[in-house]
Amino acid sequence: MHSRYRPRAGSPHLRLASRHWPWPGLLTGLAVIAAAAAAALLAGASLAAAQAAGARAASGGTWGTAKEVPGTATLNAGGSAAVWSVSCASAGNCSAGGGYTDSSGHGQALVVSQVGGTWGTAKEVPGTAPLNTGGSAGVGSVSCASAGNCSAGGSYTDSSGGFQALVVSQVGGTWGTAKEVPGTATLNTGGFGMTYSVSCASAGNCSAGGTYAPNHNSNLGQAFVVSKVNGTWRKAIEVPGTAALNTGRNAAVLSVSCASAGNYSAGGTYFDSSGHVQAFVVSQVGGRWGTAEQVPGTAALNTGGLARVWSVSCASAGNCSADGYYRDSSGFQTFVVSEVNGTWRKAIEVPGTAALNTGGGAGVPSVSCASAGNCSATGEYADSSGHTQAFVVSQVGGIWGTAKEIPGTAALNTGGKAAVGSVSCASAGNCSAGGRYADSSGHTQAFVVSQVGGIWGTAKEVPGTATLNTGGRAAVNSVSCASAGHCSAGGFYTDSSGHLQAFVVSQT
């Protein structure tokens, strides 16, 4: 359910944050994760029983019709809007964040909330007007702990054109005033700060991570984490241990996941002394961050020197999974790695991708864990024709299964450019995912697909986007499921004038 937003085109940090979407200049300043099943697992029932319970809960889940985010027709006078992150606390109660361009062509940050199944009116993030004097702001990550109690993170540009990291919180359904991440004024003297990921364990208890530049050397960046405790954001710190790891140029936290207050895990990337890009993980236990470490096993896998953790998901304290990619002699490959009882195990190539990824261009942008050892991950790979295809893979009882092409995408993706933006699991075996594909005309379309009772269904174009996406560029960037069969997704489409617009769609 997580999604990464992007720095402006040409930024030296673009390589840290860019995703596989084909429009890196999109949105200047935006860089672009069921109770019945859970109860069954806690009671010691078999996974099959849990999946059956989840399947019953998921029955009848139907995707509605996508619509332009209410209020963005007025806000998005500059014609470049998108939803980058969605988070649902309960069925029909979600929040989303993203960005738009105003009539002056400046990038602004937006938030919008769904209450009782109805999406309200999007608005500029309160407080960003005085902060964003450089005219390039956006929200890239949203997390909701309970209905109406969320936090979001992103960035803005100050009057000197420097990027600063921001956070903003919603309490009791009302969004407060955005502010620079506490402590980053001291850390980010080089003017490149961004919050890439936010995760909330309970109302008022969250963690966030990102990157900052300690001086004006454009080839230097460090990773930070910051926690909100009982409603107050504390001071950001450099991720412990990254000073020793990041002897090269850049480091960043790209994903954070909270299992419970004070128990978080995060992952990201850094440059070693040889200029190679490596992946790291770090965990917080009892409110104290430990020491970052290179992802175990990636030293052997990453012979080509380009690895990153893209997504982390924690089901309970000390039990998480992460995914990402690395480069070997054949190209880019995908990996998954699990934390079990507080210890990160050895990363492995995603089972089955060696056979799929004959074109050597794989990545895993999203993972979601419903319970310890029961997760799903999504990604893309390059086939023997050089076409990009989308895959899913599931972990059951701690064992990762075999990756497979997402059912139905072979028929949809006749243009050979499929990718997955996000996956979210409500209970073991009950997940939804979304992304984009290219049709026979070369137009990119948005799709959603759901897993029910451990079985992935058939992907389909997001209902309603055929009407909206007359300009032929659409994608789902983020999916969030509050309970099995009750999810929301957000992304963008292009209208007949070639303007990018933001959309939301819900499953009930």
Image: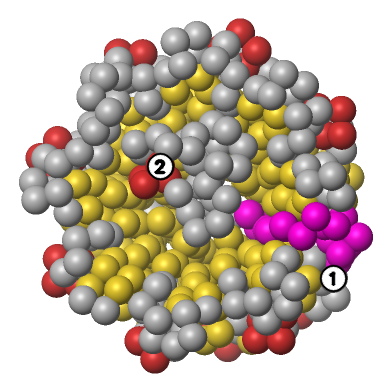
Image height of 53 relative to 171, above or below: below
Q: Camera-side residue: 59 or 311?
A: 311
Q: Camera-side residue: 259 or 78?
A: 78
Image height of 370 relative to 17, above or below: below
Q: Secondary structure at mark 1?
A: loop
The percent coordinates of residue 115 (x first, y second) are 83, 41
The percent coordinates of residue 109 (x first, y second) are 65, 28
Magenta stretch encompasses residue 405: no
Magenta stretch encompasses residue 483: yes
The residues colored magenta run 463-484
**Left or right, residue 463 beside residue 325:** right
Tag shown at residue 62:
1
**Left or right, residue 161 beside residue 93:** left
> Circle 2: is it few (<14), some (14-19), or many (20+) Cα within 10 Å?
some
Q: Earlier in the sequence, mark 1 or mark 2?
A: 2
Residue for point 36% across, 38% down: 13
Q: Amino acid at mark 2?
A: Leu
Figure quadrant of the C terminus? bottom right
Q: Secondary structure at mark 2?
A: helix
Figure quadrant of the N terminus? bottom right
**Left or right, residue 194 beside residue 423:** left
